[in-house]
Amino acid sequence: MGEITAIILGAGKGKRLKRKTSKAFVSLGGRPLLYYSLRTFEYHPRIESIILVVRTQDFEKAYSLIREYKFKKVRKIVKGGRERVDSVWNALKEIDFDPEYLLVHDSARPFLDENLITRVLKALEKYKAVIPGVRIQDTLKEVGEENIVKKTLLREKIWLIQTPQGFSWEVLKKVINQPKFKLKPVYDDACLIEAKEKVKVVPGSFFNFKITTSEDLFLANLYLSYRKDFYESRFGV
């Protein structure tokens, strides 16, 4: 079996968090947000290498984080792009080895667990693209002009999609060779290939939420406090 590589995206500015610090380095429980997902991939036995994508001005912070916590699997640190798709593009162009699978994860989702990574990898043995998600629990409405409801969507068919999203390198190599302008709009990594390949959805976790706003960060700190014993034994938090 070939190498399995994780790409962790941490180049977001985090404007909605209302912090001067880049989102990946905003403090959560006294440690940078990036630390948690990086640590989980570092400890997963099947992940052999990690590529970090951060803003240029955060390179030294990233190197410092790696040194402080003795992360051994980080293979490269790559400059982030203007949009998410640009950051993914930059990471893919830097791959000069031949992994079998790639997992792409948002550093803004600190509470992914090893079981979720394993579920994605297991499904990749059968499918070329695998994404985790959770079923919608609320009623969804499509709204038009002046916030007038147009229709109610069937929530049984709607999933909230998360990361890490997994792909065979064979499929992603084809993406790299496409003209860049054809890759937009891209809302997540699966958008790159879902028109041509089957994309399998596996169960995610409601705890694997994305930190976007100050309210999200507040809830993340509450959750971290609630799971204090678990994270102390796992990460020393």
Image (cartoon, rainbow, N blue to C red):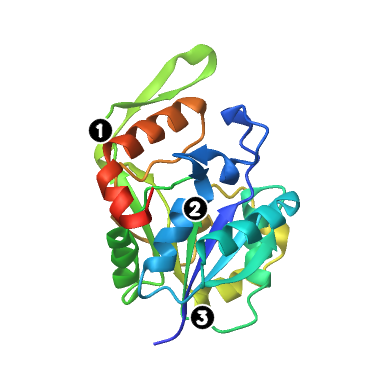
Mark 1 near mark 2, Cβ–Cβ under 8 Å? no
Q: Is residue 39 left or right of residue 156?
A: right
Q: Quadrant of residue 218?
A: top left
Foreground tag (2 vs 3): 2
Q: Which residue is mark 3?
A: 99
Numbered tag placed on residue 35 in the rendering: 2
Q: At which x and y percent is residue 157?
A: 29, 43
Say whether residue 204 is visible: no
Q: Provide the secondary structure element on which disc 1 rests.
A: loop
| Rendered position, 211 above or below 164 | above
Numbered tag placed on residue 137 in the rendering: 1
Q: At which x and y percent is residue 2?
A: 44, 86
Under mark 1, the amino acid is Gln
Q: Residue at x 65, y 37 (%)?
A: 21
Say whether residue 79 is visible: yes
Q: Dot 2: within a 10 Å radius of its alpha carbon, few (fewer than 14), some, or many (20 or more) residues? A: many
Taking depth in this image into account, of 132 and 65 the one nearest to the observer is: 65
Looking at marks 2 and 3 on the same chain, the residue that comes earlier in the sequence is marked by: 2
Q: Quadrant of residue 134?
A: top left
